[in-house]
Image (cartoon, rainbow, N blue to C red):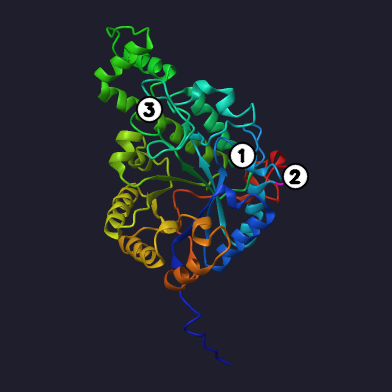
Amino acid sequence: MITTRDPESYREPMTEVRALWVVRTSITSPDKIANVVATAKRYGINTLFVQARGRGDAYYASTLEPRAEELSGQPTSFDPLATIIASAHAAGIQVHAWMNTDLIWSGVHKPRSAEHIVNSHPDWLARTSDGSCSPIASSQCEGLFVTPANPDVRRHNHDVFLEVVRNYQLDGIHFDYIRYPNADYDYGPATTSAFCAFMKATDPAAPVKSSQSARVHYIKAHFDSWTDWRRAQVTDMVESISRDAHAARPGIVVSAAVFADWKDATEGRGQDWKRWLADGALDAIVPMAYGPNTSKVAAQIADASAAASSAGRLCYAGIGAWHIPVESAVAKIEAARAIGAQGIALFSYGGVTRDGESAAYLDKLAHRCFARPATLPSMSWNVPAPAATLASGDSASGHGAAGH
């Protein structure tokens, strides 16, 4: 007997990433994680960017960084990252570890753990030319950043990323805050010394600058060279982590949430994401096109999409759904699709569900935008290895020995 499908319930699949950013406060208990995954499944979300590293701390089992203070009420056997990987994978949803890379603390109190970077390595903190930095977030700076210009910082961040890549069955890693706070940073003594040494190696006739004030003055007199060198330190870290992550887990997707205005990103913050795409360090770019104006958002997504396409990579449009009406989010999603972006990422699960308490926003959005199922786009350059050859630390539960 021939049967027909209900035209209202059957849709040909689309090919696109449909992602939610999941902030760390949404994964602090098994019940919260179950709600995240159930919500994603219900509304056709196929990818979760899960904040595994928040502020120089770990929402997973780490030998390198302290366990997040927000998990103090949970047994030490509770591993948020392993739990959400197991649950999401069972539901057919990918998990990418969202890692706040250089922002490592914000708030009025210092971290409690002596092992936290703020307490153990204050010399790693990025500073302004007057030597200041503050954990109190402002419109200009979100808190305390480590400086990418310090080789020890780059090495530590590399090892933190590789720890989760090797010990968890991740589908991707997702850079965030992979930058300096703004153009006023980093003028810490170690950074200014390193730059002057670089300039001396480039030009042996360059004068030796022994004092911090003399080095800052020298930088201002050679600002273009300083800007290029400062930017290169971030690029070096991205490329090193990406290269070794792909080697450790072939097929893993490396992406980055970036300032959508490339000029602002690269000149003021050292975040040269167009180069990262062109160099093949990123598999996908996620411009944070969070503004309310759809025309401006569309222009930002078009710029990122063109850069990704030129590099043979993908672009997922980051939409600031938490602070715009559903109709505005729909317009931006439709614009991104028309431009040719390969995916949509909504910020954030907590913002659009009121921390899991309301389905109203996603009900309306999914009805308009996600009625058709979606399959993930392919990445011909990024082919997973056979399961038997993956990192030996993996286990069926989603983590290895380090994950308890």
Secondary structure found at label 1: loop
Quarter holding the C terminus is top right
Quarter holding the N terminus is bottom right
Decide if residue 308 is on the left or right side of residue 10.
left
User: Against 142, is 326 above or below?
Assistant: below
Quadrant of the rendered image containing residue 274: top left
Residue 201 appears anywhere in the view: no
Q: Main secondary structure of the magenta part?
A: loop
Q: Amino acid at mark 1?
A: Ala
Q: In this orientation, which residue lies closer to the viewer: 185 or 208?
A: 185
What is the crowding at mark 2: few (fewer than 14 residues within 10 Å), some, or many (at least 20)?
A: few
Residue beneath label 1, please?
A: 58
Counting residues from the N terminus, which is met first, the one under dot 2 or under dot 1? Answer: 1
Residue 177 appears anywhere in the view: yes
Image: magenta residue range: 74-78
Magenta span includes 373: no
Q: Amino acid at mark 2?
A: Pro
Secondary structure found at label 2: loop
Identity of the residue drawn at 61% across and 37% down: 163
User: Against 246, is 351 above or below?
Assistant: below
Decide if residue 239 is on the left or right side of residue 89.
left
What is the crowding at mark 1: few (fewer than 14 residues within 10 Å), some, or many (at least 20)?
A: many
Residue beneath label 3, please?
A: 185
User: Against 334, is 171 above or below?
Assistant: above
Question: Where does the image place residue 359, in percent across and percent down from the top left?
Answer: 54, 67
Decide if residue 11 is on the left or right side of residue 51.
left
Residue beneath label 2, please?
A: 75
